[in-house]
Image (cartoon, rainbow, N blue to C red):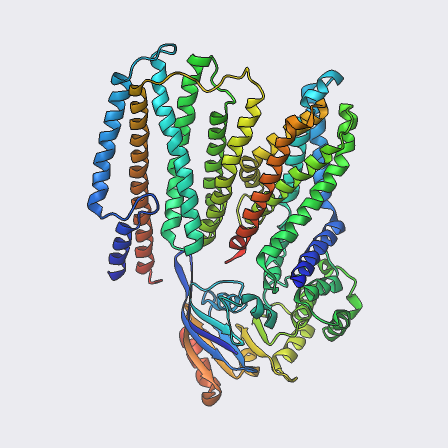
Amino acid sequence: MIAVEQLTKSFNGQPVLRGIDLHVSPGECVAIMGPNGAGKTTLLRILATLSRPSGGRLTIDGLASESHASAIRQRVGLISHQPLLYEDLSAEENLRFYGRMYGVPDLEWRIAALLERVGLDLRRYELARTFSRGMKQRLAIARVLLHEPKVLLMDEPYTGLDEQAAGILDEMVSNGQAPRRTIVLTTHDMERGLQYSQRALILVKGQIAHQMDGSSWDPARFRQEYRRLVGAAR
Amino acid sequence: MKQLIYQVGTVIRKDLAVEMRSRERLIAMLVFALIVILVFSFAFDLRVQDAAAVAPGVLWVTFSFAGMLGLGRSFVREREDGCLDGLLLCPVDRSAIYVAKMVGNLLFIALMEACTLPIFFALFNLALPPLLLVVILLGTIGFAAVGTLFAAMMAYARARDLLLPVLFFPIVIPLLIAGVKLSAGLFDGQPWSEINHWLHFMIAFDVILLVVSYLSFEYLVEE
Amino acid sequence: MAERQSQETTARTATGTPLKARPARAISLLHILTAGAIALGLVMAFLVAPREATMGDVQRIFYFHVAASWTGYLALAVTFVAGLLYLRRGERRWDRMSWASAEIGLLFITEGIITGSLWAKPVWGTWWTWDPRLTTSAVLWLVYAAYLLLRHSIEEEARRARFGAVYSILAFVAVPLNFMAIRWWRAMHPLVLNSPGFGMTPTMLITLIISVVAFTLLYMTMLSLRLRVARAEEALRQLRLQQEGLT
């Protein structure tokens, strides 16, 4: 589903990603961990086609990012630190806007269903400005699920969340429902990261320093490597 | 193609909805326009006979400065709330975002102008030549075309409010000249054949700058 | 080590649009040519060219004024083309050239305006006139200033380069339109002072051509030197990053 070959990215002449190779199968959940500044957010932004790589290739669902970025966007959803919501619009107006931009069919029905799923149906007419951080993140989750993306990218989504929002996220990440989405998630939280993923990697200074997948699943060793590479494990 | 138009329309509607909620941009533009006109009134100590001579200049200075104030804010929401990323994540052509923003700006500036014109004509005690509206529209299109591009740049720059006028004015001076010449000609009742080349000029300027801006926008938002 | 080597090779061949690729030796040939042309131009302007009938010796400023202004506009064209090439190809050297050309262009246009003003005062009795060429030069000055200010306020390198390039494209399109507009504007007021019409003798014409060529060569020299500095700065930065173990 996701094929990354020799991906590099530099800002101001300084390399942030130095040759990443990654292949993610459909339905797989990958957790990326690493210290601050390792390049996790940059990698995710490139996968979301928000950022262009300085070198290397990216293919999602068979589509190359250089030529089919727009088609990739239709299939990808991103949850980042910022909720990407318009403060002056209500919950449903925000969803309606994004829904229209993505060309979501049966939009009104989906908005109602999603608001209910994230527990915001009672607040659908209230402005996003009035929401707490947890509520905003829940609305962001609704936003990302609107167009039913095949690939979900989540950048440290658990930061600053309340119980309810974390629970909803857990539900999404555990990927219970068919069709299973392909998920790439970055986190500082080792336990959460290892809980639902089938593959985990440690990113340090723009390179993959350690990988662990189904065939060699060894959480203890992973934690050890993490401690060694990064310092104290969280 | 149809989807593109729909997406452009969606962004325009969203911008209108956001603006109507707080109205701060619109009000700021309006108040500023009125202040500029008043300041000019005091500065020139206008009497009825002299009014027609300075009126075109006052009109265009007011519109360009007040318009610029509004332009400066057109990407602020996106910038502050991080929504520009949200927009860029959508499967939409970057140039379509430009069109939507440009039309939005055009509407806002036109609204400010519509509110300001009656006051202008009252203060200067002049009659409104109908063709003037066409001239103002052409000028506004040019402002919006170029200004939207610079407003997008400002979303990424330091000292953004200070920089916008510096970037904006050298480029739109031709529009100002043409606007003033045409307005003066219309106020004075000059024969159309003498001034219509200015109109052609404005149209040409608008078309060229629109095309260049449309093509350049994607380079601004790319990362 | 290999990286520095390739940097040097790039430095030698990448001298950009109006200048074709030259080895380092030819750059010093440029210096010599420039020095010679300037010397010749000075001699011609002050000694050889005849004294103008109505204006007197002050007319000699004309040679410097036209040459400086012409170079100022040439610099805009270079900034534009280099900017366009940067957008299409993404190679940093085009951005360096665009920036360097804008900096130097600002200098030449400033000189053009000052010499124009110095000439205007004794001839027309006023320091400034809204004649199309002077006015457009003033606008061009503002454009350069805006370009440099814009670059200064964007922190990220690649974005700074792209924004500069886009602005230079807009400017290149707007400045000629500007000239047209002002020309028409002034054409409606016949009593405004026109461009100083004075008959040019063949000697004067030759002097003018030599001045223009000399200034163009000077521009090219300054551009190549400025580019050399820019490349050195970049190499230094790369070395520093290597030192810190970041590369």
The quadrant of the rendering that contains the N terminus of chain B is bottom right
- Residue B25: image x %, image y %? 70, 44
In this orientation, which residue lies closer to the viewer: C99 or C32?
A: C32
- Picture quadrant where residue B70 is located: top right
In this orientation, which residue lies closer to the viewer: C50 or C110?
A: C50
Is residue A234 visible from the viewing direction of this image? no
- Residue B124: image x %, image y %? 75, 24
In this orientation, which residue lies closer to the viewer: A139 or C14?
A: C14
Q: How many marks?
A: 0
- Picture quadrant where residue A228 is located: bottom left
Q: In the rendered view, does C154 fall on the left or right side of B52? A: left
Q: Is residue B11 above or below residue A136?
A: above
- Picture quadrant where residue B140 is located: top right
Q: Residue at x 76, y 18 (%)?
A: B48
Residue sticking out furthest to the left = C25
Residue sticking out furthest to the front = B193
Q: In the rendered view, does C52 fall on the left or right side of C164? A: left
Q: Residue at x 34, y 23 (%)?
A: C63
- Residue B202: image x %, image y %? 61, 36
Q: Is residue A186 above or below residue C172?
A: below
Residue sticking out furthest to the bottom = A215
- Residue A132: image x %, image y %? 70, 63
Q: Is residue A52 above or below residue C236?
A: below
Q: Is residue A108 above or below residue B155?
A: below
Is residue C221 visible from the viewing direction of this image? yes
Q: In the rendered view, does B133 fall on the left or right side of B65? A: right
Q: In the rendered view, does C167 fall on the left or right side of B109? A: left
